[in-house]
Amino acid sequence: MSSNIKVEKKCELQIKEQRNHISDPSSNFEDCFMLFREMSDTYYNDDDIVKSCQKWLILNDKSAKDLFQWTFEQQKNKTFSSFLAFLYCYGLGTDANKEKTFFWYKNVADFEPLAQNQIGFCYRTGFGTTQNFEESLRYFKKSAGNNYATAQAWVGFCYERGEGIEKNEEKAVEWYIKSAEGGCPSGQLTLAHRYRQGIGTSKDEVQAFHWYLKSAERGTQEAQCWVANCYRNGSGTIKDVKKSFAWFLRAAYLGDIVSMTWVAHYYFVNEGVSRDFRRAYIWFKKAADCGDSTGLKYQADCFWSGFGTCQDAHSALKLYKSLISDDTINTRDLLHTIFRT
């Protein structure tokens, strides 16, 4: 196994470990509920929580239908209301139902910060209820007042957009700071953007990098891409192409298409990692398979020149021709290549 493949395998393992929220197998449905609470209270996004619950079910050979039935039987205990709402929201073990999602979150929104945040989101988007920005902000503020960091980020967003309240960029940043310091990855990412752009606060590349890194360490794909860019350009930190490659690689494994192309670029130009045309071709192809025209262009170049794959002018020309109508690609060189053959 080449050293480059070992680096990628190590990165993949680190990501799996970071995403593994399940310890020992357990037949108790209450453990799945506790998994939901733990991830919600530490501000993981709903997609990750759904995947972890599904993984728990597979690991313990349980059905989503039985999980829902067990949770439904606990409905007299308000402790389980938010979990029941969550199952209705994503159709886990039952048909997805927006109105019942709203009902069960509302059932505990008088005292539970998670439910208050979710009701705020329901009012904001009209999910299971009538859209109402004023009510949305009211519930976000109730949750934020109980130190729920995701809700603090939403309050900031309301001030930023002027939803339910007069637009105020400075107030938005104040709430993003509270959210970021409270450990919310999305709040940290948004605050980093504000420092980078100087919106609602003074431009500060060091603070921007600090909060990008905090969010990236929690597994936020977009933040990882920004950390990689900061290391590449020396923005807010010391320039370090090896660390840039490492963060692009992590983001690429999480599915960030732009990062896939950057990983391939680093392999191709012998920057931050040992030159490896084969790995470059593989990552250009991954980006192309995800619909990225830049990755497709470089995949065609690899076919044309025989870098990292067998030289194949026919396949190269076929890919070049598919890019002619793409506005993001300089077509002059493509046309020159196509018509000179």
Image: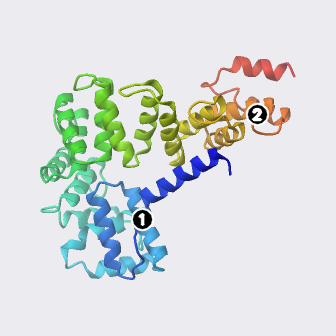
Position in image of residue 113 (x %, y %): 18, 58
The disc placed on residue 307 is 2
- Type of the residue with mark 2: Phe
The disc placed on residue 176 is none
- Type of the residue with mark 1: Ser
SS assignment at label 2: loop
Q: How many marks on residues?
A: 2
Residue depicted at 80% across the width and 33% down the height: 306
SS assignment at label 1: helix
37 is higher (above) or lower (below) than 66: above
Would you say the residues marked 2 and 1 are in contact, meaning their CB atoms lie under 8 Å apart?
no
82 is higher (above) or lower (below) than 202: below
Give the Cα separation between the discs numbered 2 and 1. 40 Å
* Residue linked to disc 1: 52
Residue depicted at 68% across the width and 43% down the height: 282
Position in image of residue 118 (x %, y %): 26, 56
